[in-house]
Amino acid sequence: MATKQDVLSLIEKTYPTLSPSARSIANYLQQNPLAIVSQTSAEIADNTNTSKATVSRFFRQLGYDSQQGAKQAQLALRESGVPIFTQGSSLDQTAQELKNLSLTFEGLRPDTLNEISERLANASRVTLIGFRNAYPLALHFRQQLQQVRHSVRLLPQPGQTLGEDLHDILDDEVIVLLGFRRRTRQFKQIVEALQGRTTVLITDPTGQVYNQQVSHVLLCHLGNESPFDSYAAPMSLISMLCNRVFGFLGDAASRQTQAISALYEDLDELEP
């Protein structure tokens, strides 16, 4: 079964060996990629003036047991984070974002959020680690926390290795590890290196494989309907955690923000 490549890539690869009728199917699917997951074999046959049997042979030539197998492989690729069309252009983006946010926050336990927020407020240091698409989220998280508390660092630093920094973890330090689908191969090794530490993992449902190796897992839903993932839910979660940290720190957080605002003015860094 071909599962590591999307159907369009396999069509391009096998095109020279296809019969004229199979090429008609290939041409149609290349022009209408959504048909792979939204149409049945009979519908594809009708739209290409071929037969259902020809469509079945076509997908077997690609390496699938059936058209349904190709559909499932395509959906599995999208679930893993590969940008692939699975819905039409009429997708309601607002409704999808609200769905992602609702699923995310309905799955978060208030007592867990309070415990994590209190630890983020009181730890001697907070370390944020993120790679690829998680890096800008970690960067934003750091910027927000630095407004209200000291000793917040972001890893990895550009061009630097992680070994010395992971070895330098303090006893009461909190590590926030952000990793979403299509994580780097190094991610697993980092989780293993941090076992026994207070580690909070912010991830999508695929990151639940690390449930037993970290202190807490906060799941965010990114959606599968559009080709690209949405990071509205994790950004909203970060905002929630930072607001809670502010609440735990109280006057100390207010003094920190005032001091930083005064520096902004002294350095003339922000617009009036």
Image (cartoon, rainbow, N blue to C red):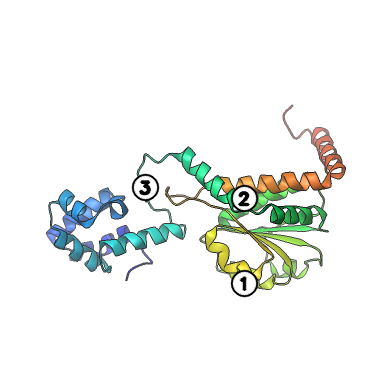
Q: Pick the residue in front: 141 or 220.
A: 220
Question: Callout 1: helix, strand or loop?
Answer: helix
Question: Callout 2: helix, strand or loop?
Answer: helix
Give coordinates of residue 161: x percent, y percent: 67, 66
Give coordinates of residue 215: x percent, y percent: 69, 65
Depicted 271 relative to depicted 165: above or below:
above
Between discs 1 and 3, the one toward the N terminus: 3
Tell me: 45 left or right of 11. left
Between discs 1 and 2, the one toward the N terminus: 2
Can you tell which mark lies on residue 87? 3
Quarter of the picture holding the C terminus: top right
Look at the numbered discs 1 and 2 and tell me whether their residues touch, using CB distance below 8 Å: no
Q: Nearer the viewer, mark 3 or mark 2?
A: 3
Question: Callout 3: helix, strand or loop?
Answer: loop
Q: Looking at this rendering, what residue extends furthest in the top direction?
A: 272
Question: Dot 2 corresponds to which residue?
Answer: 136
Q: Pick the residue in front: 179 or 46.
A: 46
Dot 1 crowding, Cα within 10 Å, few <14, some 14–19, many 20+: few
Question: Dot 1 corresponds to which residue?
Answer: 189
Residue 113 in sight: yes
Q: Amino acid at mark 2?
A: Pro
